[in-house]
Image: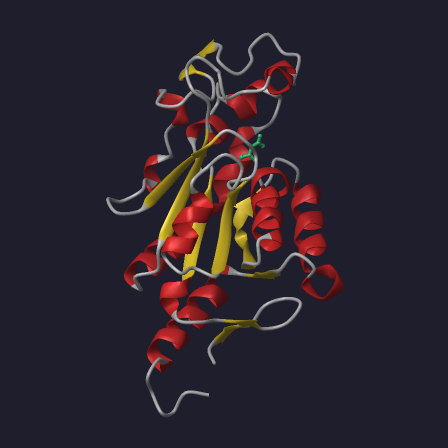
Amino acid sequence: MAFIPALPYNYELPESSQVALIVIDMQRDFLEPGGFGDILGNDVSSLRAIVPTLKHLLEGCRAMGIPIIHTIECHQPDLSDCPPAKIKRGQGELTIGSEGPMGRILIKGEPGNGIIPELAPLPGEFVIHKPGKGAFYATELETILQEHNITHLLITGVTTEVCVQTTMREANDRGYECLMVEDATESYFPEFKQATLEMVRAQGGIVGWTATAERVLQGLKQGISCSGSIDCP
Ligand code: C5J
């Protein structure tokens, strides 16, 4: 059985077709000035640190034929899918739906709502538009996973303690085996990222596993080179 050396212990891999890479909300709204992250008072430049590692992981997974699922946090132009409580949060001058420098903030299809060019989805990859923090709430994600027999999720993106962690918890409760990729997720608050990594893998992996992108890629390659071989461990 192939595995990824991970914390709190090895993450066992099934057939590569049963593993998916999830890339959460790598959209301009969170990474560029004038977007949702910025209007909430965050230093958005801090999230860019993971882009090269995430790109490397994405390209490695693509080369191995692993299904890729991107998510985008967004709302309909009429805000019918956005609870008033969410609009009110932040108490700034601008809010969800306001006109910003990259178009209307957090609205589907606006320039600021696009995934950053370095990580742009390729044809055939899934793109989930989600109105909540978790990627399962009010989306087609679970149906896609079931239809494709996917049981294991490699979870990346931003921000670690908000949409990434919420999605991982939602997935864990639904029975998916989840691994958060340590250097392919980022937060505006380094201490929140650290705490999230520790809390998901505490208590014997109560929410799942964590590992670096390099270890993930090595484990996946080992799994692929092993499938069908009599020399496999
Ligand atoms: C936030 C996200 N932080 N993608 N969204 O509001 O984590």
Residue 85 point in image, percent of width and height: 65, 18
Q: Pick whichever, 124 or 144, lies toward us.
A: 144
Let me know if residue 52 appears in the view: no
Depicted 177 relative to depicted 97: above or below: below
Q: How is the image coloured?
A: secondary structure
Residue 211 point in image, percent of width and height: 56, 62
Q: Residue at x 67, y 55 (%)?
A: 200
Residue 127 point in image, percent of width and height: 36, 40
- Say left or right for 151 vs 133: left
Instruction: Give the image quadrant in which the ligand numbered 1 is located.
Output: top right
- Say left or right for 223 vs 154: left
| Quarter location, residue 201 | bottom right
Let me know if residue 155 appears in the view: yes
Q: Pick whichever, 50 or 108, lies toward us.
A: 108
Q: Residue at x 64, y 66 (%)?
A: 7
Q: Residue furthest bottom?
A: 230
Residue 29 point in image, percent of width and height: 47, 26
Depicted 82 relative to depicted 197: above or below: above
Depicted 33 relative to depicted 129: above or below: above
